[in-house]
Image (tube, rainbow, N blue to C red):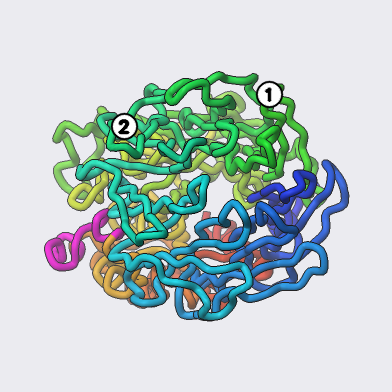
Amino acid sequence: MSYDIERYLNVRKAYGASFGPDGERLAFLLDTTGVPQVWTLDAPGAWPEQRTFSDERVTFASWSPERAELAFGMDEGGNERTQLFRLDADDGTVTPLTATPDAKHRWGGWSHDGERFAFASNRRDESVFDVYVQGRDETGDGATLVHEGDGWLSLAGWSPDDDRLIVHEAHSSFDHDLHVLHLDSGELEHLTADTDDVRYGSPEWGPEGDALYLVSDAGSDTTYLARLPLDGGDLAVVEDGGEWNVGGVALDDETGRLAYSRNVDGYTDLTVGELAGPAEIETFPEPDLPGGVCGGVSFGPDAERFSITVNGDTVNPNVFVVDVESGDAERWTDAPTAGIPRERFRESELVHVESFGVDGRRPSDRGAESHGGLEVPGFLTLPDGAEADGAGASGDIPVVVDIHGGPASQRRPSFYGVKQYLVDRGFGVFEPNVRGSSGYGRDYAALDDVEKRMDSVADAKACADWLADHPAVDPDRIAVMGGSYGGFMVLACLTEYPERWAAGVDIVGIANFVTFLENTGEWRRSLREAEYGSLDEDRDLLESISPIHRADRIAAPLFVLHGENDPRVPVGEAEQIVEEAREGGVPVRKLIFEDEGHGFTKLGNRIEAYSAIAEFLDEHV
């Protein structure tokens, strides 16, 4: 029996959980209605209760530490201008907390007594974020501005005595600073060294409030778990990730219990323990969790257990609860698979593709062949009967090369209903992590910066060439698909190596770096220029690498999809490339959703979009 795309898109996701103050109720997000909403659950496997009922997506939910109430966020039509709300968990009343729909609000957490919450917002100036504190009973414009920012600020929680906030400042994806904001005096204390290109992420307060625990790559290619004392002492390594990144840390500031993860070639290696000293950890048994990818740890009261979201190639996201000391794990949610047997889902295979090196031996021109030097990791999923090593080879399998956005992001062996549908229809799906991807150290992530942008496109070509030589694959039926920056990669692949691709699917992608940077949200421009190049200093380069100026080279059929309300990559990028490609005489299809932003979150739109993509691939690949 085969299943249509609608069934695969109805495979549900439960994630983003947190414990209520009594430690018995769990709140989480679930997309049963077609968009994520807040649900609660009183016991593992119990019938969940839906708590919010909007047609718009809920972006997060956070229990108050003292009351039966939650804060949650919601935007409108994918515009990412999140507003904050309070939900009374006993009677279901929803109270709007913010009344500035033109501004973004980035949740900063409850105070420990539940009387206040903090957030960062660009209310005052769209291009920068300020810090606000608001009483739980205050609504509308009741927030107090406690710090005027001049960049990309976010908050990482209240100190144990609720007199300070951690302020994280991002200058680019790989250049961060940390500050402590003293609420009594308004002083913003800079904690980190004035060094460029150092990451400080996932900061958490230590139990005494005298240090932060975080992940950093200061002095290292990969990130490690570190302790940063607040008395001016040096950053100290607590746990070294070795050749892999420590991905994040969650720490209970009362007990010192913590969990941190290592990203091992895309798979999660989770460590649970408690602080035995300022820079020492006593580890507990490793939880036995399915899937291979997990995250989003949230400790319950007294940190005796924590919730975590688990997923994998064949495991749709669900929330598990783990006993900290024993490591025993129990699944609490039961997000359904839309009646598709779980054994129907296919596992991916981690492979490494040789591309050209990084020692100056780059392709001599845009049409040059790649040559040996760098291994590009990726996940290959083939239909039943065919294996990544060539076993069961038929030589007639079409493949979709699906490239992630970011670009500082990473494909991992996570559940993806569209991929499982394509594989069930006889397609292979290859998800490469071309140079510039995160997860493999700072040096790898920087290999596509600014003037090296097109090197990542050459990696995609190397992956397609590798697939063409695979005994199971039809070399004439290799398509490329991607969203956001991955959409740029699609267009660049079609313009730089037009002979290689059978078709392309561009989802909310960049066609023209100049117009993209000119029109993207004010709050994002400086961060994006740090990655792609400056409009003032690198305009010629940005013009030269923009697919819009080489659209006449597109030879393969192209499908362009976008959201009308996209604040990151404005819809004009889709309009430009469609117009230029059509003039070249190639088959071009366009689909714009008026109630979506940077991607498609509403189930009806997702069904329409991916049904159309499936038809397009069936027709042209």
Q: Which residues are magenta?
A: 527-542
In the picture of the structure, the residue carrying the numbered disc 1 is: 325
The answer to which image quadrant residue 210 occupies is: top left
Percent from the top left, x then y, of residue 155? 44, 55
The residue drawn where x is 72% and y is 38% is 320
When the figure is inspected, residue 302 is found, relative to residue 518, above or below; the finding is above
Name the residue nearer the viewer: 394 or 331: 331
Residue 538 falls inside the magenta stretch:
yes
Name the residue nearer the viewer: 510 or 409: 409
What secondary structure is the stretch in magenta mostly built from? helix
Distance CA(mark 2)–CA(mark 1): 28 Å
The residue drawn where x is 60% and y is 47% is 419
The answer to which image quadrant residue 331 occupies is: top right
When the figure is inspected, residue 265 is found, relative to residue 68, above or below; the finding is above
User: Label 2 is placed on what type of residue?
Assistant: Leu
The residue drawn where x is 76% and y is 72% is 93
The residue drawn where x is 42% and y is 50% is 166
User: Label 1 is placed on what type of residue?
Assistant: Glu
Q: Secondary structure at mark 1?
A: loop
Q: Is residue 598 left or right of residue 331?
A: left
Percent from the top left, x then y, of residue 385? 66, 31
In the picture of the structure, the residue carrying the numbered disc 2 is: 235
For label 2, count other residues whose C-alpha is less than 10 Å away and answer few (under 14), some (14-19) or many (20+): many
When the figure is inspected, residue 426 is found, relative to residue 221, above or below; the finding is below
Q: Residue furthest front?
A: 184
